[in-house]
Image (spheres, helix red, strand yellow):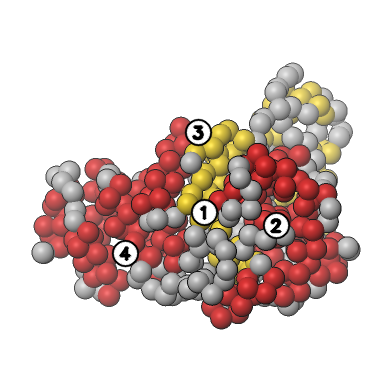
Amino acid sequence: MLVYEIIRKKLDGEKNSAEEIRQLVMGFVRGEVAPEQMAAWLAAVYIRGLSDEETWWLTETMAKSGRTIDLSPIEGIKVDKHSTGGVGDKVSIVVVPLVAAAGVPVAKLTGRALGHTGGTADKLESIPGMRLNLSEEEFVAQVKRIGCAIAVATEDIAPADKKIYALRDKTATIASIPLIVSSILSKKLAGGADAFVFDVKFGDGAFMRRLEDAKALAEALVRIAKLAGKKAVAVLSSMEQPLGCAIGNAIEVAEAIDVLKGSGPDDVRELCLAVAAQMLWLGGAVTNPEEGRSKAMELLQNGAALEKFRQLISAQGGDASIVEDPTKLPQPSYRVEVRAEQSGVIAKIATRKLGLISGQLGATRMGAEQIDPSAGIIVMKKVGENVESGETLAILQSNKQIGNEVLEEVRNCFAIGSSAERLPILAGFVG
């Protein structure tokens, strides 16, 4: 069929067939379908949508457009998790060793910083010697040996997604649920896991601002994953304020270690337990998520999760002594406190803005700059907490000097009022 007809059908609200979608996507990857033609079809999808069947066909085609990882040599149900991205999100650093400590194999492909959100790979690479660029053989062998591995997805994993995503970014077609689902799930399917837990975030610091949109995405992810023959659950979590206190790379690793030691910020621990509970359930280690949460808590308290994290670091060439002494993580040249100019209650935090400022300090790639692993922001006051004039709202750190204008920007991220309720981290489950 002519590409023209494939585009016309979707523009008219008709259904594309599996073969039409395969022809369009693979033709685009090979350079046989022009970018303007693919852009027209993406715009039609943005307006007209896709059925679940069409979304699955698109996802499957993208997943098979490159190399897929074979995890069959690893015994048991292999579980992976995915976050839609948030400010201060260090959940993977905690849950991968936590779940593996219970005997559920976790083969985690991860990404780097994107926009105002940090990347798990960048965070872990702040550990001296830690290597995330594993070959498939190394990746599979490590999961077989210690029960978990975290690696950066190579360029040949779902290459169609990379090419299509770049075009979506240029044509304002990012915010389409079927296209988001196919992008996320194609990479996960290529990673070879049997079951997925999706942490779908909403709020100021998230890609989806509204809870109802996040819920629609979560439902679609679970539906299409099940069409692919995979087990799947989604957790809905709030990003109306940073997750935990640390926003950056080395400082988020240090905070994750606190959680693995059974302490750390309440919201990080609660979300990690919720995600781990679902992973343990899908992985067959427990009979229900409630039992999974209890099991996860036990593994934090008895040191098993922390020991598995040590093994993970050592297996990937990192200095595991940072677990006992986090000061061995990169330290900044400059550390500046931002103080409140009035008393009251923290009513709101401009979370997205804090993520962007953290990037300006060096925590993400800004232009051609390299990441400064020590850079970031430590949030000292969360929504609903009292603050006195002169108290510290946040600590900024970087290897470059921090100007007064940045301090003022951060101060303005904290709205101080007369009262505010503390924000719950969890908003429900889909599965």
Q: Quadrant of residue 333?
A: bottom right
The relative height of residue 274 versus residue 165 in the rendered view (above or below) is: above
Residue at image point 63% right, 60% down: 104
Kind of residue sitting beneath label 3: Leu
User: Does residue 396 show up?
Assistant: no
Residue 314 position, x and y percent, is 76, 74
Kind of residue sitting beneath label 1: Phe
Marks 4 and 1, how far apart at CA: 19 Å
Q: Nearer the viewer, residue 139 or 205?
A: 139
Q: Nearer the viewer, mark 2 or mark 4?
A: 2
Marks 2 and 4, how far apart at CA: 34 Å
Q: Quadrant of residue 353?
A: top right
Q: Which mark is residue 211?
A: 3
Query: Residue farthest to the front?
Result: 287
Q: Earlier in the sequence, mark 4 or mark 1?
A: 4
Q: Earlier in the sequence, mark 3 or mark 1?
A: 1
Q: Which residue is mark 1?
A: 196
| Helix, strand or loop under label 1 | strand
